[in-house]
Amino acid sequence: MKTATVAAPSAAAAAAPAPAPAPAPSVAAVQAALSAEPRAEPAVPGPVAEPPVRVAVVIGSNREGRFGPVVAGWLLDRIAERDDFLPEVLDVASVDLPTALSSSPSPAVAAELAKVTPALADADAFVVLTPEYNHSFPAALKNLVDWHYGEWRAKPVALVSYGGVSGGLRAVEHLRQVFAELHAVTVRDTVSFHGAGAAFDEAGHPRDPAGPAAAASTMLDQLGWWARALKDARRRRPYAG
């Protein structure tokens, strides 16, 4: 029977040193490796949906045969094309306010005010439609404005006018002075219809719709910006006026 013989390691082999461990990577190498790895971008929150602006659309004429409802209908159609406004119509022809102002109105006058005052108070913004009578705006509109004060304050007002050759723009400029006195802010751009009766067809649509629609879009953009900016400001700090 043969016996396997295992040779003892030589002295040289026994004395051989163990292999050295791999050197640790340098800081620069680690940084380079990390920068090469794809990193997920932090999630960006989407825009927060804002509630629509509550806008009171004031029809400013009560004259017999008035054209205001035609212009108002066109404007409300433009507002309905957007999702940033919630309109409410206030018609001076539907409220009977005396011209004698009073801090203690009678029950009858208080009942008339109840038709319009809450809506004005709740509004974030206003669009006032005015014709031009004798180079200015109607008395019924001025009466509605004068019966209120705080309801207008620190809120924006857009102006839409209609008339003859001037398109009601002289009435608009007078209204700017009135609303400035009431601490309201009138937006710069307006919509005006010159020769209004001929500018609309029998269905109440402008014969040349592109220009008025573009003007309305610009005006409403400005009104919405001012409405939100002033609402935020009133919430943060009560108006000092």
Image (cartoon, rainbow, N blue to C red):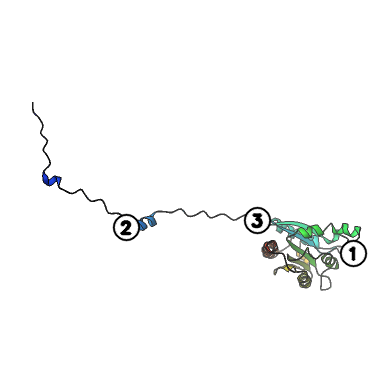
Residue 195 appears in view:
no
What label sits on residue 134 in the rendered view? none
Q: Secondary structure at mark 1?
A: loop
Local packing at callout 2 (Cα closer than 10 Å; few below 14, some 14-19, many 20+) is few
Real-space CA distance between mark 3 and mark 2, rounded to the nearest whole angstrom: 52 Å
Judge by depth and name the residue closer to the eye, 32 or 76.
32
Position in image of residue 53 (x %, y %): 70, 58
Identify which amino acid the numbered label 1 is placed on.
Pro
| Contact, mark 3 vs mark 2 (Cβ under 8 Å) | no
* Residue extending furthest toward the left: 1
Real-space CA distance between mark 1 and mark 2, rounded to the nearest whole angstrom: 89 Å
**Residue 100 higher or lower than 118, as above or below:** below
Position in image of residue 86 (x %, y %): 72, 56
Position in image of residue 147 (x %, y %): 84, 65
Q: Secondary structure at mark 2?
A: loop
Q: Secondary structure at mark 3?
A: loop
Q: Which residue is mark 1?
A: 98
Q: Which residue is mark 2?
A: 26
Identify which amino acid the numbered label 3 is placed on.
Glu
What label sits on residue 50 in the rendered view? 3
Local packing at callout 3 (Cα closer than 10 Å; few below 14, some 14-19, many 20+) is few
Judge by depth and name the residue closer to the eye, 174 or 71.
174
